[in-house]
Each structure stands twice: as C-alpha cells, then as structure tokens.
Image: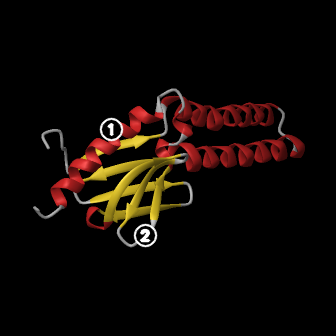
Amino acid sequence: MDDVRDSVLGVWRVGRSGRLGGCLLAVGPAGGALSTWWGALSHPDTQNVDAAGTATAVALGFAFFAWWLLLRVRLQLTTDTIVVVNPWGTQRLPWSRVSAVTFGNWGARFHTKDGFTYTAYALSDLAAGVRQDERFADVKRVADAQLRDGQPPL
C-alpha cells in the first residue's frame, strides 16, 4: 500500500465529540479543584485544605475515568497486527488469525479462525457525529486488502 507509514495502515479513535466530551469531563473538575486550592491558599485553614484535597481527588478520578473510557480507546491496523484498545484491555491479533471483519452494534468485530470475536469499541456509538458505516467502510477496506494479501493464491 502506498499510504503505509511505519507499518501503520490506519488508526481510528473515538470521534471528535467523544474526545471533546472526555476532555471536558477531565477539565471541568480540574478547574473546580484549582479554584478550591486558590481559596485554600487565600485562607489557609484545615477545612479549606481538606476541601481542596478532596476536590483534587475527585478531579483526578474524573480525569482517569475520561482517559480510560474515551481518550485511550483506539483501533490500530498495522501490516502485521490489529491492535484493539478497549477500556478493559488491549488485544493484539496477528492478521494470520483473522478470518473476517464485520460491523456490530458495539463497533468493528474481528472474527478469528478459532471462533473468537474481538470488538473494537473505537468504532462504536462513542464516535458520535460521524456515521459509523462510513468509519467501518474505511476499516473494512484496509482489512479486506490485508486479508486478501495474506491468503495463498487459489
């Protein structure tokens, strides 16, 4: 393929609106924590410092949650493997194990020759604002070319 760079065929992430929502989910509480710390620095007493510490913990929790569920999720197709990063784990599938690629309710589904199915949630409804069938068509085009190239001639 002519558009291959460093063996990466394509990377798909949660759509812009999902990433924006994730950033807002992280930045909103961080702004509140900064405001609370400003108050604690202006009037240093135990109650204000405790409130600032609690606000910081909540902000860190929201930031981690947003990163884990929205900003980290991706699908990366390379010339050798498929890398599926979902909130609960990362799967690396060699192309030689994949028999088909379909589109399901929760994203692109990679079917392996041993009967297992791996879903890439980067193409799920979290990618709002972009038609899912169009995003999947790009993945399917790359996957079909890769699967066809890996098959022995008939």
Residue denoted by label 1: 138
* Residue 18 at x, y percent in the picture: 55, 34
Q: Which mark is residue 115?
A: 2
Q: Position of residue 139 (x, y in %)?
A: 34, 43
Q: Eyeballing the image, is 15 above or below 99?
A: above
Specify the amino acid type for callout 1: Asp
Quadrant (top left, top right, bottom left, bottom right) of the C terminus: bottom left
**Depth check, front residue: 140 or 125:** 140
Whether pointer 1 and pointer 2 mark residues with C-beta atoms closer than 8 Å, the reply is no
* Residue occupying the point 47% across, 35% down: 132
Residue that extends furthest to the right in the rendered view of this protein: 47
Q: In this picture, is 48 found above or below 96?
A: above
Say what secondary structure mark 2 lies in.
loop
Name the N-terminal-most of marks 1 and 2: 2
- Residue 60 image point, x, y percent: 66, 47
Q: Is residue 45 above or below residue 87?
A: above
> Which residue occupies the foreground of this view, 145 or 46?
145
Residue depth check, mark 1 versus mark 2: number of the one nearer the observer:
2
**Residue 136 position by quadrant:** top left
Q: Residue at x 74, y 46 (%)?
A: 58
Viewer-nearest residue: 134 or 90: 134
Q: Which residue: 40% across, 61% down?
A: 111
Res 80 quadrant in image: bottom left
Give how far apart the Cα atoms at labels 1 and 2 are.
24 Å
Taking the spot 22% from the left edge, 52% from the top edge, the residue there is 146
**Helix, strand or loop at mark 1:** helix
Q: Residues within 10 Å of mark 2 (few under 14, many from 20)?
A: few
Q: Quadrant of residue 92?
A: bottom left
Q: Position of residue 142 (x, y in %)?
A: 26, 45
Which residue is farthest front? 154
Which quadrant is home to the N terminus?
top left
